[in-house]
Image (cartoon, grey):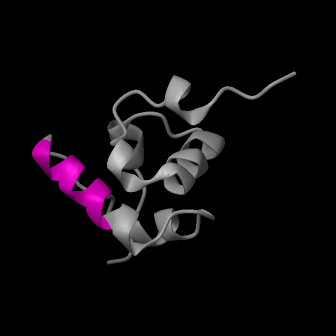
Amino acid sequence: MTTPHSDDVLVDIPANIGRPARGALAEAGYTTLAQVASLTERELLRLHGVGPKAVRLLREALAERGLAFADREA
């Protein structure tokens, strides 16, 4: 059985975050920006393959859609 490629399952996750980050999100089951918005930046950074640059680019993509990361640290 083969696992679907991240490009096949990610709905609106920007490609510019990089293949490792896209793969990490797909593996964790996050396929849309709305789902990513349910995470904190710290939670995202815990995913192997997601680094500060990917988080910054995701933050920008979320902001363009009027979304933001969760803020559970406060």
Where the N terminus falls, by quadrant?
A: top right
| Magenta span main SS | helix
Q: Residue at x 58, y 63 (%)?
A: 49
Residue 16 image position (x, y, % from top left): 34, 50
The region drawn magenta spans 56-64
Residue at the far bottom: name it.
Answer: 74
How far across and down, in percent of the image, does residue 42 sit?
A: 46, 72
Q: Relative to 33, is 8 on the left or the right?
A: right
How many marks can you see? 0
Which residue lies at the image location 19% right of the left edge and 56% below the top edge?
Answer: 60
- Residue 62 magenta-highlighted: yes
Q: Residue 8 magenta-drawn?
A: no
Q: Position of residue 58 (x, y in %)?
A: 31, 55
Image position of 73 with respect to 62: above or below = below
Q: Is residue 60 above or below residue 64?
A: below
Relative to 73, residue 29 above or below: above
Residue under the point 37% across and 39% down: 13
